[in-house]
Amino acid sequence: MPDHAFIYFVLLHSIAGVLQNGNPKSQEMKNDERLALMISVLSEPVYLGHPLMVEAKLINYGDHAVLVNSRMALGYENMPSRELYLKIIDENSGEYADIYEVDINRDFSTPGDFCSLAPGDSLRVTFNLFEFYQLTRPGKYRLTAYYDASEPLAAKPPGSDSDIVESNSLEVNVHQ
């Protein structure tokens, strides 16, 4: 038969730890990890010159609502007016993939583009990756997306999230 005093001690010690440190789940989740970005390829097999449909999903895993840019417009990392961009790595060379960049002219976000994303809620956007990132040759590529609504020249409402959120990485085999 177990020693009841020992079980009582372990139980009290566990409760005291939670009271002192707060919810263990919230302790594990850093401030920049309350949002997650997941990408998935919706059209396979993938061929050059054909659409490559990708879905990006921004999820709030935090305990509080987060003010995010719901526009989730795709662009390039060095563009001032975009919320999503990708890094595409050529798996053969380990270097950034050769792409043709498209000239994108887009207005900056307005405060009306922002919304409150409640805990457990998500935003989704689907786009043709090859419309913006035109690969120059077939091969195996690693795709990683980033949500970044920091747009320095945009009119953002106070309290909007400006963290950069990195997605999962996907390997895509692009055929001729």
Image (cartoon, helix red, strand yellow):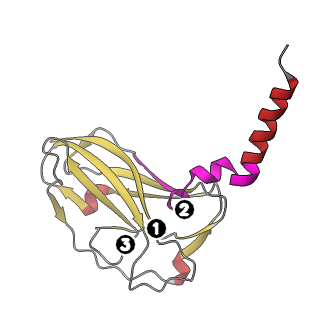
Q: Residue at x 14, y 56 (%)?
A: 98
Which residue is label 2 attached to? 31
Q: Nearer the viewer, mark 3 or mark 2?
A: 2
Asked whether, in this view, residue 58 is left or right of residue 168, the answer is: right
Residue 9 position within the rendered picture, expressed as x and y whole percent measured from the top left: 81, 34
Which residue is label 3 attached to? 82
Dot 1: within a 10 Å radius of its alpha carbon, few (fewer than 14), some, or many (20 or more) residues? some
Q: Nearer the viewer, mark 1 or mark 2?
A: 2
Q: Earlier in the sequence, mark 1 or mark 2?
A: 2
Residue 46 position within the rendered picture, expressed as x and y whole percent measured from the top left: 26, 42
For the residues bearing labels 1 and 2, Cβ distance under 8 angstroms: yes
For the residues bearing labels 3 and 2, Cβ distance under 8 angstroms: no
Q: Earlier in the sequence, mark 3 or mark 1?
A: 3
Instruction: Residue type at mark 2: give it.
Output: Asn
Q: Which residues are magenta?
A: 18-40
Instruction: Residue type at mark 1: give it.
Output: Asp
Dot 2: within a 10 Å radius of its alpha carbon, few (fewer than 14), some, or many (20 or more) residues? few
Q: The C terminus appears in which quarter of the rendering?
A: top left
Instruction: Residue type at mark 3: give it.
Output: Arg
Q: Of the numbered discs in the image, which one, if any, rests on residue 77?
A: none
Residue 47 lies, with reference to residue 134, above or below; the image says above
Asked whether, in this view, residue 134 is left or right of residue 121, the answer is: left
Residue 131 lies, with reference to residue 93, above or below; the image says below
Which residue is label 1 attached to? 163
Residue 22 position within the rendered picture, expressed as x and y whole percent measured from the top left: 70, 54
Q: Residue at x 70, y 51 (%)?
A: 23
| Residue 64 in magenta stretch | no
Helix, strand or loop for disc 3: loop
Distance of label 1 from label 2 (alpha carbons) = 9 Å
Q: The N terminus appears in which quarter of the rendering?
A: top right
